[in-house]
Amino acid sequence: MDIDTTGWLDIATRVPSPNQDKRPPGVMPEIIVVHAISLPPGEFGGPWIDRLFTNTLPAEGHPFFAEIQGLTVSAHVLIRRDGETVQYVPFLQRAWHAGVSSFRGRERCNDFSIGIELEGSDVHPFTGVQYERLAQLITALKKTYPGLANAPVVGHADIAPGRKTDPGPCFEWSRLQVLLGA
Ligand SMILES: [Zn+2]
């Protein structure tokens, strides 16, 4: 797995999101944030995550879609249940994944983070290939961006406590650590 000079992954399907902008001047990614998402909640597959991140989710498609209508969000990458990897935002750009957030007293984590979504929920174990892909991606990011070499890998819940729970109780941090050789 490699990342090109413009911040795109070679193995990913590209679905560019409009929900991105420049990082503040001189700011590079320093932390990696792991998320979980499923649309509708608890259901897997379908085009809905791509549609959410490209502002084309049909409100009439599901009651939950109506609820989240108008959200402008994105992540850098989504890893689906079968390991398919989709990239929405190049890594040097700011993806809009963290929302109101704080890491070690520093706010607006989108400025200085990479956001990776796993297709999953609070009640479904993640798949083996998702852990493998996630570990490969983190390894590639650490190799490509010096500021990430010793970067913390945290959950969305860690930087937005009380507001977010993902990646949730099914995510096995120890399993990721083993794959990263940490
Ligand atoms: Zn999240």
Image: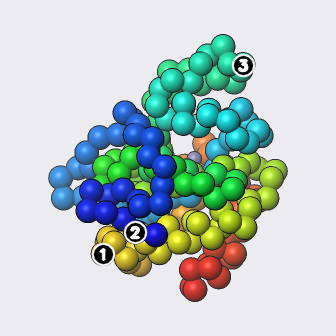
Bin the neighbour count of mark 1 within 10 Å (Cα to Cα): few under 14, some 14-19, many 20 and up: few
The answer to which of marks 2 and 1 sits earlier in the sequence is: 2
Disc 3 versus disc 1: distance between alpha carbons? 44 Å
Residue 90 as seen in the image, left or right of residue 124: left
Residue visible at 76% across and 50% down in the picture: 122
Disc 2 versus disc 3: distance between alpha carbons? 39 Å
Residue type, mark 3 in image: Pro
Residue type, mark 2 in image: Asp
**Circle 2 SS class:** loop
Which of the labelled discs sits on residue 2, or is there none? 2
Bin the neighbour count of mark 3 within 10 Å (Cα to Cα): few under 14, some 14-19, many 20 and up: few
Residue type, mark 1 in image: Pro
- Viewer can see residue 179: yes
Residue 169 location, x and y as percent?
75, 58
Q: Which residue is mark 1?
A: 146
Which of the labelled discs sits on residue 63, or is there none? 3
Residue 109 as seen in the image, left or right of residue 146: right
Relative vertical location of residue 43 with respect to residue 87 in this rendering, above or below: above
